[in-house]
Structure formats: C-alpha cells, structure tokens
Image (cartoon, rainbow, N blue to C red):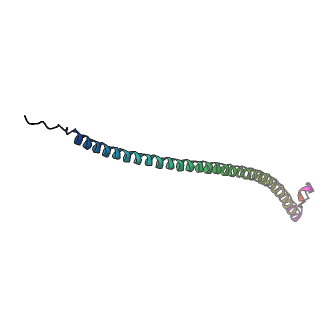
Amino acid sequence: MPRKQKYKPQKNTDLRSEFRNLRKKNYHLINQLSLKVKTVKELEVENEMLGKTIELLELKNVSHKKELNLIKKENAHRNNYEDKYVENLIKENTSLIEQIKIYNKAIKIYQNEIAMKISGQVKPEFDSYFLNFD
C-alpha cells in the first residue's frame, strides 16, 4: 500500500484569502469612519461658526432695537414740539384774525366819519378805542 500523504487542508489559503478580504473591508470601514469623523468635526466647526454668527446677529438686533427706540423717542419729542408749535400758531392766527376784525370795524367807522365830514353831515358818535392802531 502506498503511503498516504498527509492531508493539508486547503483551508489555510482560504483563511488567508478571507483574512485579506476582511483586512481590506476593515481598511475600507476605517477609511469610511475616518471620513465620517472628519465630516462630524467639520460640521461641529460649522455649527460653532453658525452659533457665533447667531450671537453676532442677536447683538446687532439688540443694537438696532436700541437705535429704533432712540429714533422713536426723538420722533415723539419732535412731534410734541411740533404739536406745541402748531398750537401756538393757531392761537397766534386766532388772535390776528380778531385784530383784523377790529381793524376792519375801525376802518369802516373811520370811512363813515370821513364821508360824513365830506358831505357836511353831523359827526356820528363812536368809540375812539377802535381808532387806536398801536
């Protein structure tokens, strides 16, 4: 009988091949994980930058609100001043209108007096207060 050769299972090469394949997959997964970690870090940096941008915008918003309040106060003050100015103008105009009415009456009386003097009629009685134009 011939001597039997030792049987070497071919599994060793299969195991090596499987080990290589698993190592390749492992490298591939490690690369993917590295990319994902890098992406997460980039997103964290971007998120931090966006947070700072939001803080800056909030500060700017507060500044704009303060500026708007100042403008509102200035406008209220200006409107109050203008209202008082308009009220004073109305009072002054009313006073001037009354003075004009008085002067018109005085002019009519004076015209009547002159007309009577020219025509030789008797001088009518009237209040000399209306002839005072000071």
Residue 1 vertical position relative to residue 72 in the rendered view, above or below: above
Classify residue 80 as left or right of residue 51: right
Classify residue 98 as left or right of residue 18: right
Viewer-nearest residue: 45 or 73: 45
Viewer-nearest residue: 61 or 117: 61
Locate residue 125: give its quadrant.
Answer: bottom right
Locate residue 9: give its quadrant.
Answer: top left
As drawn, the residue found furthest toward the left would be: 1
Q: Quadrant of the N terminus?
A: top left
Residue 13 vertical position relative to residue 74 in the rendered view, above or below: above
Number of callouts in the render? 0
Q: Quadrant of the C terminus?
A: bottom right
Point out residue 31 in the picture as x, y percentages from the top left corner. Answer: 37, 48
Classify residue 33 as left or right of residue 76: left
Locate residue 16: give its quadrant.
Answer: top left
Which residue is drawn at the image coordinates 47% and 48% (left, top)?
41
Residue 60 sits inside the magenta stretch: no
Point out residue 23 in the picture as x, y percentages from the top left corner. Answer: 32, 44
Which residue is drawn at the image coordinates 31% and 46% (left, top)?
24
Range of residues picked out in magenta: 115-129
Viewer-nearest residue: 30 or 21: 21
Which residue is drawn at the image coordinates 71% and 49% (left, top)?
73
Point out residue 98 in the picture as x, y percentages from the top left corner. Answer: 81, 53
Point out residue 38 in the picture as x, y percentages from the top left corner. Answer: 44, 49
As drawn, the residue found furthest toward the top would be: 1
Classify residue 33 as left or right of residue 4: right
Viewer-nearest residue: 124 or 22: 22
